[in-house]
């Protein structure tokens, strides 16, 4: 059996990236709205839509062509679509096949606990950060710099020790590279503050002044990966004008705050996990690893097909539970998989846990030889998250407004999709939704939504004053979070109606 102390394997990264959809997917950063009291501007019976939810559903998803722009007509279609989703959810109710299904209940539980951990991170991380102004000024001084560097990376602490010894003995950066790597050309790249980079690399380059030719490292930039850097040169790009100065200052504060918050939160989580130990039963572990490896390590063709399905059909891989992998665990379900302190977890126990918390691998890319190690670490991280969720439950974070509203959003979205499918099936619709959605909207859904607007008009309230002030963009974006079990931030845009009229309900006072 191999044992792992859980608190030594903590890793917390709550970074949001936006995938902007043009011809290709391009990574860029976008700050999420702060968690705060929600401003409600629409009520639909016991359901509601906040300004925060309106922006996320409109901006963090790809809208259909009929409401893609930022004009007032398209903004009304967006609002009508979100209200229609709530109306369909009301019609679906809670007594249906979807709500009763174990898979859906596991999905909602997993989503809830993820939001609770984010709230815990806010309370035990972000809110406990108090940045020193001198640190902000120091980081700001170099935040406009773009470095040109040479670098090489090797695996293992033994390599790091070797590099240090060779540097201490006077061997040059190039000489060490030739000794260890052996190829003639040393890799080069540019590094700038505004791009997404490893915190260790950032701190090594941007927190104080450097000199040309200076060698930095070896640094453990990633777990088990040692990087050594040589400064080849740089250009400074000062922020000019009040707007750009303030933007850069805010970016610096945000990055420093996030880094410090992660450090504080890791210490908190370490206290939660102190003394807990995981022991894997090697024989069973490798049986399970062999069974699940094809799902987590697909071929390139399978990866492309999987991406196309998940992207265009809005189905995220994390929504799958282990039962959907197509493997038969019945023969080994009662075998011991691991021991957590003195508690034995069987294969069935792990399968049940993964139905709620899909695995998150620490490394984005690794080869098949490394799969057992990465699989083991992902299991440990899942156990860590389980204990953090338990702490959040103790504090009542399952009942705080941001968590409750997030789960209502996902639940209502699922109910509306279920109700729409049932309605179209009962109406005898034979169109293919993916290809003929406009025909379905015009022939089936618009009349249905109109009837629901009339049916529920007395319980619909809209604060039109707030709605008039909302501003949108026309840029296609698809928002995901990194290193969480459920990466997609909000449900796909509700493609239900292209109605441009707000001729129902009453004005919210």
Image (cartoon, grey):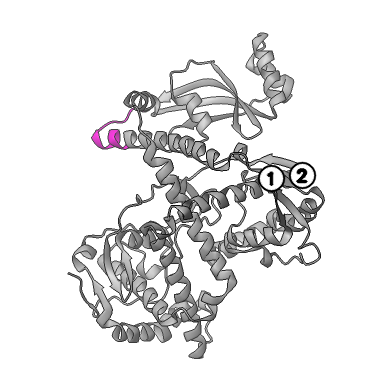
Report the quarter where the N terminus lies: top right
Is 40 part of what is drawn in magenta? no
Q: Looking at this rendering, what residue extends furthest in the front direction?
A: 342
Q: Which of 357 and 50 is in front in this view?
A: 357
- Please report whichever mark, 2 or 1, sits nearer to the chain's N-terminal start: 1
Is 240 part of what is drawn in magenta? yes
Q: How many marks?
A: 2
Q: Image check: 425 left or right of 50?
A: right
Q: Do the residues labelled 2 and 1 touch (CB within 8 Å)?
A: no
The image position of residue 100, as x and y in percent, is 54, 76
Look at the image and tell me whether residue 251 can be seen: yes
Q: Image check: 266 left or right of 68?
A: right
Element carrying mark 2: helix
Number of the front mark, 2 or 1: 1
Report the quarter where the C terminus lies: bottom left
Look at the image and tell me whether residue 21 can be seen: no
Local crowd size for mark 2, using a 10 Å CA cut-off: few (<14), some (14–19), many (≥20)? few
Q: Residue 502 carries which label?
A: none
The image position of residue 443, as x and y in percent, is 41, 86
What residue is shown with label 1? 278
Query: What stretch of residues is rendered in magenta?
Result: 237-247
Element carrying mark 1: strand
Q: Which of 471 and 324 is in front in this view?
A: 324
The image position of residue 401, as x and y in percent, is 36, 59
Local crowd size for mark 1, using a 10 Å CA cut-off: few (<14), some (14–19), many (≥20)? many
Q: Which residue is drawn at 24% across and 65% down?
A: 467
Q: State whether residue 352 is above or below residue 88.
A: above
Q: State whether residue 409 is above or below residue 150.
A: below
What residue is shown with label 2? 369
C-alpha distance separating marks 2 and 1: 22 Å
């Amino acid at each position: 059996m191999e044992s792992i102390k859980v608190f030594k394997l903590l890793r917390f990264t709550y970074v949001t990236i936006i995938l902007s959809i043009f011809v290709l997917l391009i990574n860029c950063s976008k700050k999420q709205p702060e968690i705060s009291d929600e401003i409600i501007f629409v009520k639909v019976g016991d359901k509601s839509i906040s300004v925060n939810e309106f922006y996320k559903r409109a901006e963090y998803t790809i809208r259909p062509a009929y409401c893609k722009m930022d004009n007032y007509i398209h903004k009304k279609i967006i609002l009508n679509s979100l209200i229609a989703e709530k109306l369909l959810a009301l019609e679906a109710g809670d007594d249906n096949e979807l709500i009763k299904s174990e898979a859906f209940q596991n999905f909602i539980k997993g989503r809830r606990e993820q939001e609770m951990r984010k709230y815990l991170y806010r309370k035990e991380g972000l809110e406990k950060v108090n940045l020193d102004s001198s640190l902000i000024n120091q980081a700001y001084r170099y935040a406009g710099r773009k470095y040109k560097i040479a670098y090489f990376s090797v695996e293992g602490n033994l390599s790091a020790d070797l590099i240090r010894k060779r540097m201490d003995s006077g061997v040059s950066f190039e000489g060490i590279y030739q000794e260890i790597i052996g190829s003639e050309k040393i890799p080069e790249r540019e590094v700038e503050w505004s791009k997404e980079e490893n915190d260790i690399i950032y701190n090594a380059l941007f927190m104080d002044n450097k000199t040309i030719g200076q060698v930095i490292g070896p640094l453990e930039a990633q777990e088990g990966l040692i990087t050594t850097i040589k400064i080849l040169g740089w250009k400074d790009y000062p922020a000019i004008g009040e707007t750009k100065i303030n933007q850069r200052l805010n970016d610096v504060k945000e990055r420093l705050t996030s880094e410090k918050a992660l450090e504080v939160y890791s210490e908190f989580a370490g206290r939660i996990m102190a003394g807990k130990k995981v022991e894997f039963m090697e024989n069973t572990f490798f049986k399970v690893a062999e069974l699940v490896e094809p799902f987590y390590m697909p071929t390139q063709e399978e990866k492309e097909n999987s991406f196309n399905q998940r992207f265009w059909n809005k189905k995220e891989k994390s929504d799958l539970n282990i039962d959907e992998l197509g493997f038969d665990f019945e023969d080994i379900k009662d075998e011991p998989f691991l021991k957590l302190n003195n508690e034995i977890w069987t294969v069935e126990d792990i399968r049940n846990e993964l139905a709620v918390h899909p695995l998150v691998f620490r490394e984005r890319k690794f080869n098949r030889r490394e799969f057992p190690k990465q699989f083991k670490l992902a299991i440990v991280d899942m156990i860590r998250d389980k204990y953090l969720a338990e702490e959040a439950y103790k504090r009542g974070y399952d009942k705080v407004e941001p968590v409750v509203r997030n789960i209502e959003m996902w639940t209502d979205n699922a109910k509306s999709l279920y109700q729409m499918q049932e309605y179209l099936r009962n109406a005898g619709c034979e169109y293919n939704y993916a290809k003929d959605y406009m025909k379905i909207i015009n022939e089936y859904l618009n009349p249905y939504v109109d009837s629901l607007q009339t049916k529920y008009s007395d319980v619909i309230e809209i604060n039109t004053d707030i709605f008039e002030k909302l501003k949108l963009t026309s840029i296609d974006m698809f928002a995901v979070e990194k290193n969480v079990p459920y990466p997609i931030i909000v449900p796909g845009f509700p493609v239900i109606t292209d109605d441009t009229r707000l001729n129902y309900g009453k004005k919210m006072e």
